[in-house]
Image: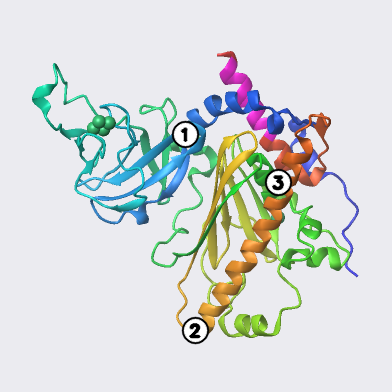
Amino acid sequence: MPVNPPYDFPMKRRYEELGTNPVSTEPVISAEYFEAERHAVFERSWLMVGRESELPNPGDFFVKRIAPWKSTVVVARGRDGRINAFHDVCPHRGMHVCGREQRGNRKFFTCGSHGWVFGLDGRVVGVSEESWFHTLDKDRLRMPPVAVDSWEGFIFIHRDPAPAESLPEFLGEINIGYGGYFDDIFFKPVGRYEADVKMNYKFYLDSSVEAYHAGYTHLQNNTGQNAKSGTALRLESSATRLYRRHRTIGVPIGVGIRDLAPIEGLAFKHGGAITPYDSRVKDRPLPSGINSNRDENWAFDILEIYPNAILFLSAPLYAVIGLWPSAVDRCRFEVEVYMNEPSNAAERVALEYGLVSLRDVIREDLNIAEGSTDALASGALKEMQLSDQEIAVRHSYSVLNQVMKDRLTR
Ligand code: FES
Ligand SMILES: [Fe+2]
């Protein structure tokens, strides 16, 4: 039976400054903390909202609820090819303009309330019965803009139309190292799940950057195999990188090995492009930021982009998770999975098995997040204990508390 070698606190030795104390439960249970966090964190960070490839043509747009801003944002490609983003609120008397239509292609947007017309950049281009108004500075009237920029094909928005910090500055260490990986020809969106969950969003972040839980939370699922074998899945210190705000962990193979149902076994045998070392993708070159140690045993990386995005990155597939909290104990959860589209029926079946397997793992994590949110709500427990293997969780709270302290005292 494989046994982990004796433990000598490699994470603590590498990240001495994070300390070893328990962490406060306040950030996950306090409504006041969440309200302050909305302003100090979400209204002052770049947020990932989608991919440029979702808007291939001028006039293409999507609408996204940005719950921590209490806003709905329209992201649209203008006739000049540039991507614009603005709050979905009419400057006449404040109705949603796009509202119910979630995505599509338009030459203009028209407010259903009194018929004002807007261009693809949110500016007013037509006012119905304009002569009835006393004065209207039409050149200045618009749906309020938000800043927009992109990284590796991902669209980010910032609530401040002229943010003090550029997107490359915000991304910091992760701004480079991922070039060429997110190839829109190779990777296509193949599956999406969404849910409204009664959880503090940070519980899902936390479960994404430690492997300690895998053998227990996921005991019934594919990642529980390590617990069944008597060995906890252990992260290498060198594959964990804690940046100024963001963090990444490398996860070794050892997850996903299990007894397959007969049909599932057949599906993976004949259409196994979803496994990390499938022969069709194992030679796919990866940029320096992914599996940065070039570890033979590597299965996937998790890249957590502060404050609310998680990227699952592997050779054959990637997934993007967005967490959109509306309250201390409420969160919209979204995941979109990208991989090479199946080229035959066997691959299609394997893909569907892969998707539902991923969905089940996610549901197990969401279940724990919901349970923790409920269990902690009374405030009876004041602090949480973190092991050395949970250093990335410790880092997440450390970054958050520092941001809150800096911004609220300014
Ligand atoms: S609220 Fe939009 S036209 Fe009146
Ligand atoms: Fe998990």
Q: Badges 1 and 3: C-beta atoms under 8 Å apart?
A: no
The residue that label 3 is drawn on is 369
Q: Is residue 46 magenta?
A: no
Q: Mark 1 vs mark 3: which is more N-terminal? A: 1
Amino acid type of the residue that numbered disc 3 sits on in the rendered structure: Ala
Q: Label 2, label 3: how many angstroms apart (C-alpha)?
A: 36 Å
Q: Determine the residue positioned at 72% across, 78% down.
A: 260
Q: Residues within 10 Å of mark 3 (few under 14, many from 20)?
A: many
Which label was assigned to residue 345?
A: 2
Q: Position of residue 330 (x, y in %)?
A: 61, 39
Residue that appears at 63% across and 60% down: 300
Q: Is residue 256 left or right of residue 64?
A: right
Magenta stretch: dominant secondary structure = helix
- In the rendered view, would you say 396 is above or below 138? below
Circle 2: residue type: Ala
Q: CA distance from mark 1 to mark 2?
A: 45 Å
Q: Which mark is residue 7?
A: none
User: Residue at the spot x=17%, y=26% of the render?
Assistant: 139
Ligand 1: give its quadrant.
top left
Q: Which residues are magenta?
A: 397-408
Q: Amino acid at mark 1?
A: Glu
Depth check, mark 1 against mark 2: the one in front is 2
